[in-house]
Structures are given as structure tokens and as C-alpha cells.
Amino acid sequence: MKPFPLRSLKLLTGIFFAVSFCYFQDTPALAQSIGDDIPRIDHSPKIDGILSVGEWDNATVINVNIETEPGYNTVAEVSTKAFLMEDGDVLYVAFVAEDDDIDQVRAFFRDRDGIWRDDRVGVVLDTFNDERRAYEFFVNPFGVQADRIYDDVNRNRDDSWNAIWQSAGKLNDKGYIVEMAIPFKQLRFSPNQERQTWGIDLVRNYPRDRSNRIANNPQDRDISCYLCQIGKLRGMSNLKTSRNLEVIPTLTSTAIQTRDPAAGNWNSQAVDPDAGVDVRWGITQDIYLNATLNPDFSQVEADRAQLDINNTFSLFFPERRTFFLDGADYFDTFEDLVYTRNIANPDYGIKLTGKTGRHTYGLLTANDESTSFLIPRALSSSVASLGEFESDVAIGRYRMDIFDNSTIGAVFTNRSGAGYDNTVMSIDSVLRPTEKDTLSLQATHTTSDYPHQIQTDFDQRSNLSDDSLRLEYRHNDERWDWRVGYTDVGKDFRADLGFINRADYKFFVSTLGYTWRADGDSFFTRIRVALDYDVTEDQSGLKLEEETEMFINLDGPLQSFFNGLFGKSKTYWNGQYFDEQFNQVVIGFAPTPSLRISTQIRYEDVVDFANTRLGHSKRYRPSIDYQLGQHVEFSLSHTLQKFDVAGGRLFTANLSNLRTTYQFNAKSFLRFTLQNSYNKRDQGLYNNKVQSRSKSLTTQLLYSFRFTAATRFFIGYSDAAFQDDSLNSVEPINRTLFAKFSYAWQP
């Protein structure tokens, strides 16, 4: 095995120590402590959206009255009070959110995690008080839940995480009331502290003419971190230890029929019932073990379709599977080296994640009976598959908190089988030398051994090894934002368990932006203008692209926005340079509480990659979201792309996504989804043989009932149809009836 890249390690070490000797400034304290220890109660309140007499009398009461957006730490125009108390097992939070015009309250019955445009209240909890990671729990006026994890190091929010907790909400003639019960065993925190100290922010989102954010803590826009500015919740002494164990058996049954349009007959597969089990064990409150046997990694809802024409790089789809989502943020780094959708068909999986003091760590091992991975290049990427070839997966992550809100860490991944191996070793750091500046850096080394099939099909050598280095310095204050970044990825760099779809390039980028802000009385509450310059070359020094861009971002009334992107580039493709230019506008607004409209328009001179020439593309993407009453939601988007070259219209591409949901209540819904794609090509304008038309149509009808985040029942039907030049009409090729039940047992 080739040793870790010495040149990258030397450079990283030099930068690290240079910055370390700089003055790491303590962040000014804006937020205030909640006050005395929050009270411990003997009798739990009923979580029903009603503050019954006596239930919350002993709670700590906090005013949530500071508008942080669009106003800058101004007094909120509506009154909100939060109530906090605990009983040793559960943290109880209630909100009384007043409103002078309840007809304007934006609240609808939705599925879990779908309330981010609604009126909502919530609590943010930094349970390790390390100002790096926090849980967020939000509820809308009908009690619909949303939860997510906020990573302040990588500035990322992940709403795929789900906890098991209770909530209820009710509208009344003065506004609405929300109650929450969050079990401590759903949270990770240090178990060795007799008296806990957590970071806390209490938040109300108040979407009206503007999207207003109200909290109990002010926010300084000249400080680039969020969690370093929130208040402190103290108390929760000697929290009870409990059997923090969840066992989630899953039963899935699927009946599938497939059809070859040329043969005409349907072929039925035997009904396939399958059982599995997931286990989540809190060894301590800061160390968790996840295990799965014969896991059901089926994805109930289809990924949203993406337009994939005149595109040379693989598309990214998010992870949705339960086993991988719990503690997924423990594996995050600057580079996307852990992309668990690459683990397609495992028999088992084991994961250990934890945080002890300043040390955060994660270990994951699994097998995979279907091995696929990306082969990245300078100007394209391919998906390689070994078919039903079993490989073993091992992933390790370590991170240590240093200085003030800074980190240093390492990642190791390995995927191997007979004649195949890929190993990734990486060190990374996020440093904050001042309250406004962030330096992110990561150096990675990879080695790969490929079997004969991959060598032949993808023109790869049997043994590969290479390095990557990524650096970025960012500055953010109330007015100015700028960044300087450099990325260097070797030609033979491979990260088969990550999502790295480009290799063999060096990339330099610089951006400078300025923002004007105003309160909600001005027509525009935010105007940002930015300039960006970047240049890309391959490892031989060949310039691949030189690009200049200008950004314009506006926020206005009726929750309106305007995002403009204008630029030009000199782009290399297949031995030639092309002068590209692009103009893109994305606009949208919400004229009523029930309606949101947006559209994307993009005109560009862009390379026709299939035929090595310059073409002119026009792309339109209108979308509409409409809420009919409190229970029915329509979401429709359509993408139309027209691509012209010398000689005529090269292709016309259409892609439609329709989703209609009847939400019975906060726990159950019936959803119909339709995805339709139609591409039409002029064969005479292509150098190689192509289909003159290709159509695909998929539909799905899905019913879901959710008892809790992990106890859920699905039943559904889906089908797919296809047409190309060999068919006279759109022909059905697949139909599936499926059911899935999972139950969270907490002994």
C-alpha cells in the first residue's frame, strides 16, 4: 500500500500550525442563561395541545419575542411564550403562540418533516454544549412533527433523522398552542454530569408577507456560528438511567410482474415476504450501537426524477434508509467520502457512534451482495457494477474538538471482495481563527485493486493509487462574504464508498459578495450581489474551464424571491474550446397561504457533448404547490428543455413530476405520484445512432399510517411503462404491489 501522501500531509500540517498560532478569538456571548434550573415535576402533563389547569404551573416560562429575520434583533409583533420542565425521563416543552389574525395562520395536515413552510414553533438543543451539533424539534399548529440535526461545523441541516417523541397542537381564537414531550433517551448527551448544561434556542417561525423568525436569543450577523450564540439550559440533575433499547422488526411483502413488450405476456414472480430486524441500543447516553439482520432497505417512495440529458456526470440521490440515517452526521466531512447508498443489498450491518468529551467517533461494517461504484474522470463519470458480487464494507470516523468551535479528524473506508479492493484514508480540519472566518481543509489518499471485468469495461489499470487535497477559506459578516478555495484531485483517485464523481482535475475559485439588509417595512429585505471566478485544469495542466459568474439575490414581499445567475466560460471538450454563456433566473412567491408558485428560466450557449459542438439551450421549469383546505396538497413541476444546433432542433426534453396527497391527519395519508418523461431527438443531427424518441411513465399509489417515527405501515401499488422507436405506443413493463410494516418495541 502506498504511504499517505507526504506532500499533502506537509501542506496540511503547515497550514494547521500556522493558523493555530493565530489568535483564536473567544466568541462574544450574546445569549443569556434560561435562569434557574428548570423544574423537575412529579406528574406528567397530557400532550393534547391544551394547557390544562395546573399542568404547567411549575414550568419555567420564557418570552420568545426577538425577531432575528428579517428584523435584526427587533421586538416581535406577536407574543409567544415557552414553558419548560422535566421529570427525569422526559423534557416537556409547550408554546403559547398568539396571533391577531388567525385566518392568516399557515397550518396544514402534512406528513412528518413536511412543515417547513408552515407556522411552527420549536426547540433547538445542543445537548453536549459543544456548540457544534444540535437537535431541532418543531411542531405546527396541528401537532405535525419535524425533527432534524444541525451540524454547525459543516453548516448542514439533515431532516432525514427521526426521533420517537410526542407532540400535539390546537388552534384557538387567540392563536395556537403546542405541547411536546421529548424523551431523554432519544437524545445523546454526556451521562457523567450530575447537572446538565445544554445550549438552547426557542424559535417561532411566522410566515406572512415575509418569512419571520422569532426566538428568545438575539443573533449577531457578524458571527458566523449559530450554536455559539444560543442560551444555556441548566438543570436535569442525575437523570435516570433506563434501558435505552429499541428493537424494530420489519415485515415486507412484494408481488411483482414484469413484461417484455415484444413478447407481450406478463411474467409473475412469487410473492416475496421478507422479515428483518433493526436494533438501536444506547449503551450510554453518548454511545449508541445500531445493528440490523436481513435488513429491509427497500425504499417505499420513489426518488424525484431528474432530467439527465446532455449531462456527463452521475446524479446524486439522498439516503432514506433507517439504519444508515441514525448517527449519519457522525461520518460527515468536507468531502463526501461516505455515501451509504453505495451499499445496496446487505445481509447485515453494525454501527457504533458516540461522543466522549471532545472526541466523536463512528464505526460501520456491513456486507453488500450487489457491488456498484463510480468511476470518475476529468469530464465525466460512469457507474461500474460487479453485479451479484459480494463485498465487505468498513467505515471509520474520528473527530476531536479543538480551540473555539474548531475540529480535526480522520476518515477510513474500505470495500473489498475477491480480486477487488478500495481503501480511502483522509485527515481533515475545520478551523475558525476569528468569529467571522472559517478554514476547511482535507487531504485524502486512495488505493484501488480492480478485477479484470472493470479493467476491460472501463479501461482501468489493475492497481491504482492517488491523492486529493481540498482547502477553502470563508469569511461571513453582516455585509461582506468572500471565499477562496482550491481542490486538487489526482487522476487515479477513487472513493468507492463516497460520492466523488470527478477526478483528474485542479480547481481554483474565488467569490466576493455584498449584502444589503432592511427590515420588513422595506420592499426588499435582502439584496445580495456577488462575483465569482473559477478555473479548472486537469493534472497535465490542460485548462478545462475558465468561468466568470455574477449572482443577484433578492427577497421581497409575499415571500417572493429572485435569484439571478449570469456568466460565461471557456470550456474544453473533446479536443476543442467553446465559448459558453449562461443566463438563469429563478423567481417565486406565495400570494396566499395556500399557494406557492415558482419558475426557473435558463438560456445558455452550451456544449453539445454528444456531438462536440456549441448549441443553444432554453430551459423552463415552472412549479406550483397548492393546498386545498387543510388536508389536500397538489405539487406539480415540469421541466422543458429545447436544444438547438446548426441545422435545427437537436432535442426536446420534457419531465413532469406530479404529487397529490390527501393527509387524513398527522399520522396517515394517501398519495398519488406520477412521473412522466418524453425526449424527442433529430437523428440526422447526431453523429452516433440514437433513439428518435423515448418515453417513460411511472405511477404510484401509496397509503401510509405512522404510529411513531419507527412504527409505520405502508401499502401501495406502482407501475412503469416505456416507449422507444421499436414500439408504437407507451407499453407497460412493470407493476408491483407491496406492503411494509415496522414496529418499534421499547422494552
Image (spheres, grey):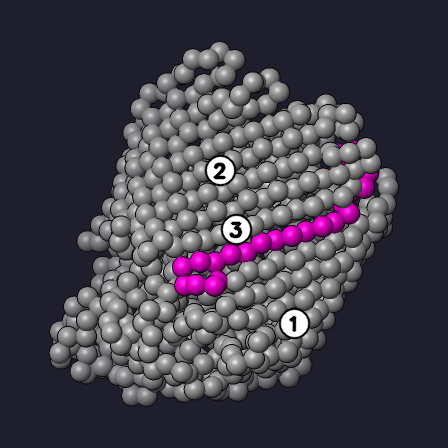
Q: Nearer the viewer, mark 3 or mark 1?
A: 3
Q: Nearer the viewer, mark 3 or mark 2?
A: 3
> Compared to 89, does 635 lie above or below?
above
* Amino acid found under the numbered disc labelled 3: Ser
Residue tagged by mark 1? Answer: 528
Residue tagged by mark 3? Answer: 623
Measure the alpha-carbon separation of dots 3 and 2: 14 Å
Kindly check if marks 3 and 2 are in contact, taking CB atoms under 8 A apart as contact. Answer: no
Q: Residue at x 24, y 67 (%)?
A: 170
Q: Quadrant of residue 417?
A: top right
Kindly check if marks 3 and 1 are in contact, taking CB atoms under 8 A apart as contact. Answer: no
Q: Which quarter of the image is occupied by the N terminus?
A: top right
Q: Secondary structure at mark 2?
A: strand
Asked whether 633 or 260 is in front, the reply is: 633
**Residue 697: horizontal and vertical position, in percent?**
49, 31
Please tell me whether residue 594 belongs to the stretch shown in magenta.
Answer: yes
First in sequence: mark 3 vs mark 2: 3
